[in-house]
Amino acid sequence: MKTLIVEDDFTSRLLMQELLKGFGMVNVAVDGQEGVEAVRLALKNGEPYNLVCLDIMMPELDGQQTLRVIREMEEEKGIFSTDGAKIIMTTALDDMENKISAFSGLCDGYLSKPIHKEQLLKELRKLELIS
């Protein structure tokens, strides 16, 4: 599984890397702009990400905006959300408005921080990324 973690908080990035490192290659981006560029390059090289863990609260390009741009890039390549990267929003915001917005933007999952290994593994199984 090829994973991209888009997270501006250093400690959260380290935690997610540690939780996901046993499942394959893990790349990190420190903000939405860098995340978009990583996805763009992966699509261009024909090696798209299987999983993108995307923080909602980031400076410049927030997670909701980043999600929309990633889905637009996939569509331009003829990849629609059901066949694209599985995108899990990770956030301290556990309110209904953000959840609705995330799922409207075609995310595949939503995890509230702090992220716990059990909840992440459950989500990965639900998305059929691991067995």
Image (tube, rainbow, N blue to C red):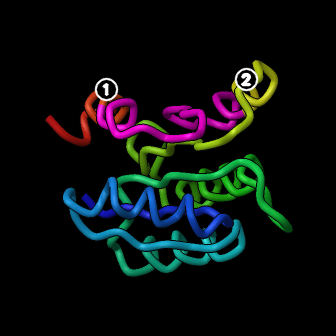
- Residue 89 in the image: above or below residue 25: above
Foreground: 10 or 124? 10
**Residue for point 19% across, 40% down:** 130
Q: Position of residue 21 (x, y in %)?
A: 27, 63
Q: Position of residue 46 (x, y in %)?
A: 34, 73
Tell me which label, 2 or 1, sits earlier in the chain.
2
Quote the CA–CA distance across marks 2 and 1: 19 Å
Number of marks drawn = 2
Q: Amino acid at mark 2?
A: Ile
Q: How far across and down, in percent of the image, does residue 81 sit?
A: 49, 41
Tell me what residue is drawn at x 25 percent, y 34 percent. 128
Residue 34: x and y in percent read 64, 76
Locate the N terminus and report the quarter of the image it occupies.
bottom left
Identify the image quadrant of residue 86. top left
Residue 45 disc label: none
Location of mark 2 (residue): 100
Question: Which numbered marker is on residue 126?
Answer: 1
Which region is colored magenta?
Answer: 102-121
Picture quarter with the C terminus:
top left
Asked which secondary structure carries label 2, the reply is helix
